[in-house]
Amino acid sequence: MVPDVGLVPIRLVKGNLSKVPPHVQQFIAKYVQICRPKGVFICDGSDEEAKEMTEKLVERGTLVKLESMDNCYLCRTDPADVARVESKTFTITREKFSTVPHVAPGVDGQLGRWMSPEDAEKELGSRLPGCMKGRVMYVIPFSMGPVGGPLSKPGIQLTDSNYVVLSMRIMTRVSGELFKVIGEQGEFVQCVHSIGAPRPVERKVINHWPCNPERIIISQFPDERKIVSYGSGYGGNSLLGKKCFALRIASCMARDEGWLAEHMLIMSATSPEGKEHFIAAAFPSACGKTNMAMLTPTLPGWKIKCVGDDIAWMRFDKDGRLRAINPEAGFFGVAPGTNTKTNPMAMATCSKNTIFTNVGMTSEGGVYWEGLEREVDPDVEVSGWLGDRKKIGDFKKSGIKAAHPNSRFCTPASQCPIIHPRWEDPEGFPIDAIIFGGRRPEGVPLVFESFDWNHGVLLGAALKSETTAAAEHKGKEIMHDPMAMRPFMGYNFGDYLRHWIDLNKPGRKMPKIFHVNWFRLDSNGSFLWPGYGDNIRVIDWICKRVDGQDNVAIESPIGYLPTEGSINMDGLNDSYRTPQNWQKLFSLPKDYWVEDVRETRQFLDSQVGIDLPTPIIKQMDLLQERIAQM
Ligand code: GTP
Ligand code: SPV
Ligand code: MN
């Protein structure tokens, strides 16, 4: 019962160490030694285990059962722990420039944060020792991608948060089987997570959510395939399979092994004629991936199936097709704005077996957030994420939000009514089109297509968007988010662009690359495009281009634009169908673009410097010339 590994015995609370391969036992023992938990709980991923843990958390008050829903729970965090903390996220490598590009002198690098191994040791050395005192260390064996699949990768997460355990078993495949897989394959990603609140706690615990926001650090060690995260229990900070592993560590694996780990949804679109296309799309956080991945088409005859809503792992197969899998098993989706009009499929998905975090709760035990005004009885009382009880209308009047803007649902992907029947196919799906997009209130047309692969890589590199609540940013400003990967890059962004460019090899069928913008505004501040289910109209055009239709596109300085009328507007309000509206959606104001390209060039020159690959510089030269001649 008490195998003695090293100096401190592993005191098992639950589980069976005999099934755990020796090198995993050593990993556990090392962190037991450092973190000093009162016991170790080896998870098996079973429903019984989850049920027991859930009951305990309800008893303690961390979770509230949502009485009017089916096996759904509400969690409210400490209001100081509500989003990813980019400023405290680091990549640790011996060589600085394997993590970050050579920025120009005096420039504050924005593409990744590097820390030396010595500094990391100091930072973690002042946090980890004894950090789990009085708490249980859970051992979570999980797989990103179907267990044992050729594109899949296993990990082990140690954590002192049972909320994290419950969330990880929705977001990843947690199973005791993984010990066998790891025993055979050897490799696994080491994930260590602590909320940084040993007992007795020093910081006042708010909402039964112990954490240590002042001392947060999220550290990735790509060379050791290791992650250590301290201080936060929320989202990408603590569910280490997601951004830390499946993007930051995996992008390094992908660089080494010749594939791609990207912040992209994966969907299939089947036309009325029955032709199925697969699309991957990269939008920055809170810019519409979940919505697009499961959109309900407003054009008759189209069918959308969802494969993934946040992360794509993609590799060229022997026939030269880029195949994508979704490494995740659940959706950790933005709640506000989600309703039966904008995203009915997400609403159906999260109607059962779901953990909601930082949303409001109705007095009947249902959920409420901004965007559900028309779907919840206005007379019902809602307790907001901060605990204040009001009628729905009174939240609006007082300007106080019922749900935090980054409140989320954590829900099994398998429950999505339009999940692709083969979504777990370990071989993945052949990608026909890659789309980049962001929130661009001005100047950027609804859709355009790159001239070729390298130009498409520039579209990704030049991606910008208005900031959102997914991280700690304040206010709305247009920020560069190249490839939607700025917060998730695992290595030097110049090398990353080179990797993308080098993928284009003879014999490969390269996906076409597009840029979309659902967020262009009219002069009165309203969206020029209805968005959501109507985005099928743009997908329809994209599929036509993938199928080689030449007559629907016309060359412009920034890429191929749709010819007027080639986007199907049937059934839209008349106001959307006027030539004036087309003009507003697709116009390319010269002054705007001259400045935009100048600014992009300055950003890439100063941020990526000598690491910027020549083909990208050439693409920028060409673009700048074309715009100058507009
Ligand atoms: P992460 O999970 O943070 O990576 O975000 P995401 O990219 O999956 O974004 P999501 O689909 O959750 O959308 C975020 C917000 O954008 C929600 O409030 C949506 O309602 C809104 N949104 C999504 N698609 C559209 C659209 O087509 N038009 C408009 N106007 N808003 C949209
Ligand atoms: C994002 O911010 O892009 C998310 C949410 O998908 S989190 O898991 O917190 O990173
Ligand atoms: Mn995301």
Image (cartoon, helix red, strand yellow):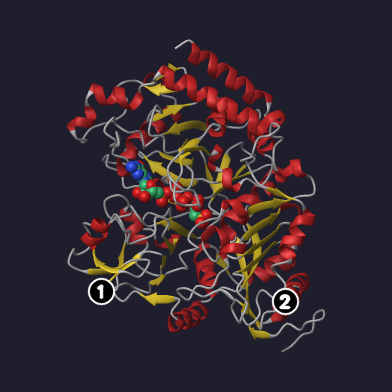
Q: Is residue 20 above or below residue 144?
A: below
Q: Tell me which residue sits at (49%, 48%) in the image.
A: 473
Locate residue 270, reporting x and y percent: 38, 42
87 to the left or right of 116:
left
Counting residues from the start of the chain, the first of labels 2 and 1 encountered is: 2
Nearest the viewer among 522 and 54 is 522
Q: Quadrant of the C terminus?
A: top left
Q: Is residue 628 above or below residue 513?
A: above
Q: Which mark is residue 32?
A: 2
Which residue type does callout 2 highlight?
Answer: Val
Alpha-carbon distance for marks 2 and 1? Answer: 43 Å
- Secondary element at image label 2: helix
Which residue type does callout 1 highlight?
Answer: Glu
- Secondary element at image label 1: loop
Q: Tell me which residue sits at (44%, 48%) in the image.
A: 286
Give the quadrant of residue 476: top left
Q: Residues within 10 Å of mark 2 (few under 14, many from 20)?
A: many
